[in-house]
Image (spheres, grey):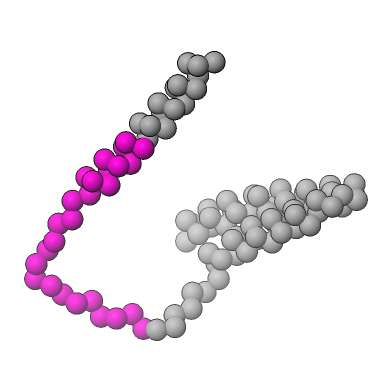
Amino acid sequence: MIGRLILVVAFLIPAVASAYMIWLTWRADDDGKWLFTVFFVFFLFLAASPILPKFVFQPKPEPVSTSTTRFVPHWFMLLAVLVVLVVILMAIVGSFLHR
């Protein structure tokens, strides 16, 4: 329950910031108030979603027990993520060196 409360607070912070921007743009008679209204509704919906009841449309199926355990090697995916991170870091370092 504490995790849900933290999630609600984390989404209420940008909702309150968007509400403040709505108030400021409304006072300035700016057209940006509609954009911030959409952001406010979006973050307010995200803040309310963890405390809403969960609807169950179908009962959960019974787990099928298998006697064998499969091992799926994850090192292919971890290696791909590592390669992408190295390439991103090299691009960042390269952009600083070519200035």
Q: State the image coordinates of residue 43 (x, y, percent, origin top left).
A: 64, 57
Q: Is residue 70 left or right of residue 50?
A: left
Q: Quadrant of residue 40?
A: bottom right
Is 70 magenta? The answer is yes
Residue at the (36%, 37%) spot, across then down: 84
Q: Is residue 61 above or below residue 34?
A: below
Question: Is residue 23 something one can see in this rendering?
Answer: no
Residue at the (47%, 56%) spot, across then down: 3
Q: Is residue 69 left or right of residue 42?
A: left
Residue at the (41%, 28%) spot, across then down: 89
The mark total stands at 0
Is 52 magenta? The answer is no
Which residue is at the front of the view, 5 or 40?
Answer: 40
Q: State the image coordinates of residue 17 (x, y, percent, origin top left).
A: 71, 48
Q: Quadrant of residue 56?
A: bottom left
Q: Which residues are magenta?
A: 59-84
Q: State the image coordinates of residue 42 (x, y, percent, origin top left).
A: 65, 60
Q: Quadrant of residue 70?
A: bottom left
Magenta part mainly helix, strand or loop?
loop
Residue closest to the far bottom: 58
Q: State the image coordinates of residue 29 (x, y, percent, origin top left).
A: 90, 50
Q: Is residue 90 left or right of residue 71?
A: right
Q: Quadrant of the C terminus?
A: top right
